Image (cartoon, rainbow, N blue to C red):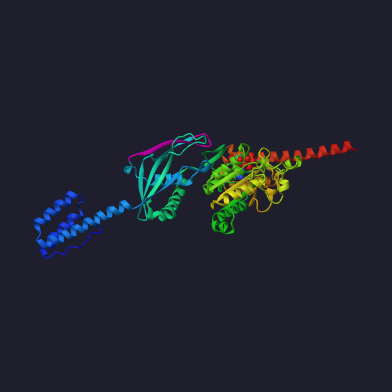
Amino acid sequence: MDHLPLAIIPSSPDGKRVVDAYKKAVTTVATATAYVMLARGMARELLPDELRAAVRWGAELVRARLGRTRDKEHRETNTVVIRRNVEFNTENHLFSAALTYLASTIDPRTMRRLCVARSKDKDTDGSSSWSTSLRMEPGGSTTDTFDGVVFTWTSAGSDDNKDGGGHWGPRETTLELSFFAEHTYTALERYVPFVMSTAEPLQRQDSSLKIFLNEGGWNGINHHHPATFDTLAMDLSLKQAIIDDIDRFLKRKEYYLRIGKAWKRGYLLYGPPGTGKSSLVAAMANYLRFNLYDLDLSKVYDNSNLHRLLMDMPNKSILVIEDIDCCFDAKSREKRKTPKPPADGDNNSIASDDDNDDDEMHDMGAYRQHNITLSGLLNFIDGLWSTSGEERIIIFTTNYKDRLDPALLRPGRMDMHIHMSYCGWEAFQTLAHNYFDVDDHALFPEIQALLTKVEATPAEVSEMLLRSEDVETAMPGLVKFLQDKRRGGIRKVTQIKNDQAAAEKEMK
Ligand SMILES: Nc1ncnc2c1ncn2[C@@H]1O[C@H](COP(=O)(O)OP(=O)(O)OP(=O)(O)O)[C@@H](O)[C@H]1O
């Protein structure tokens, strides 16, 4: 009632009072019957002049009201349909973001139909936990106001969910976002990004991190690995360099955009088993709050499967390929003297997509079963991700850096090579702090000296420290372990020397 027409000019103070009273009354009623009742009352009380003025005012009021209704009826409504999946069954991230956003804004009291779900999440350690979620049921709707514009969200089912054979599949849930056509710009350019950016931290905070494994498509389970950069035992300056690198990478969106490169960062972690490569991956995921996508290439059936898996990875995620030397190794080149395989006619073939050393790449480190080369894989990932404009991290791990395809080690391939090495003094101090909260001990100097002579992995040292909760038992136990290891090492070296001497003697 904020735009009432004010055409009435009463000719007497009494008339003004009465008209004012009726104006007030009119602003509080809405039905035609009520208008008629009021008009009768006014006719009885007002003089002809006032009555005429009142009639004029009333007529304008009704016209304005009718006009407004007509306007409303004629305003066009636009609807944006948001499906759960887009082409190739690729997950539509706007859909999940909208669900999260709505779950955080829905007022259950305003909903007629509402879906409340309790689900059990399986953790990596085999345990499970319960979570509750709230969402609209198909047919339910709710409204949200953004910058004065009212948006209506409706949960609907789609009828065009045919499977490949043209059969009708189960009805797929879609969300619909409706608004008056004149607000299209606000809806698409401002409201949708607002929904996405509001949902993003909620999705990351509320849900526990997940690790996805590829079994045809991605299957996720909760990832509760406790490793953090604080608990990671390694050289402190190297640890800081990794954190700085990640932080710098995250801030450089504009830079990557400007130079036309995919906003991605590649890390190659190498070192003996038990030096913490998997722990570092987990620490990175926990630091970034990114989900892990652990790609097992032996379960990738063909290029289109790989394509789909990579496309299905959302932004802010980490792709991990463990033991990369087992998938792509330079030694296979030596063994394989076969000529370059004929092109299979598939233009998208990863193996055919290569650069400088194409001729060799088909043999060199080709992933045997599927003819995928490492270089091709990296090019492929660059191509796919360069269009997304979002940050992604790729990590390769290996126990044997020397077995890797040289193409991977070329500058510009993996951005940072991180050597996870045997337990040094700084790494030990972190472990001692983690397990016993101690920063000093009488045996520390001896341990420090032993660690310079013995190759013990952080996993082995952790194992020794875990054997007792009492620091006074654990530290001597570790010293003995390191001394034994050292003696074993010396014995081993002496044995090798003796064997060599014996062999030389035999030759003579
Ligand atoms: N650098 C480290 N800091 C803290 N703990 C470590 C570290 N390295 C190993 N550990 C401990 O040893 C366990 C095994 O280590 P982890 O799996 O991370 O090693 P890895 O290098 O990935 O081994 P692999 O090559 O066999 O996969 C971890 O769960 C952790 O308890």
Q: Residue at x 11, y 65 (%)?
A: 13
Q: In which quadrant of this rendering is ligand 1 seen?
A: top right
Residue 40, percent across and down? 12, 53
Q: Nearer the viewer, residue 412 or 473?
A: 412
Q: Say left or right for 474 vs 489.
A: left
Give whichever of 38, 383 is nearer the camera: 38
Q: Answer with the quarter of the image where residue 18 lies.
A: bottom left
From this view, report whether residue 505 is shown above or below residue 408: above
Residue ID at (82%, 37%): 499
Q: Is residue 2 above or below residue 201?
A: below
Q: Can see residue 5?
A: yes
Q: Give the residue furthest to the right.
A: 508
- The residue located at (9%, 55%) in the rendering is 44
**Residue 473: quadrant of the picture:** top right
Work out which quarter of the rendered image holds the N terminus and state it.
bottom left
Q: Which residues are magenta?
A: 112-127
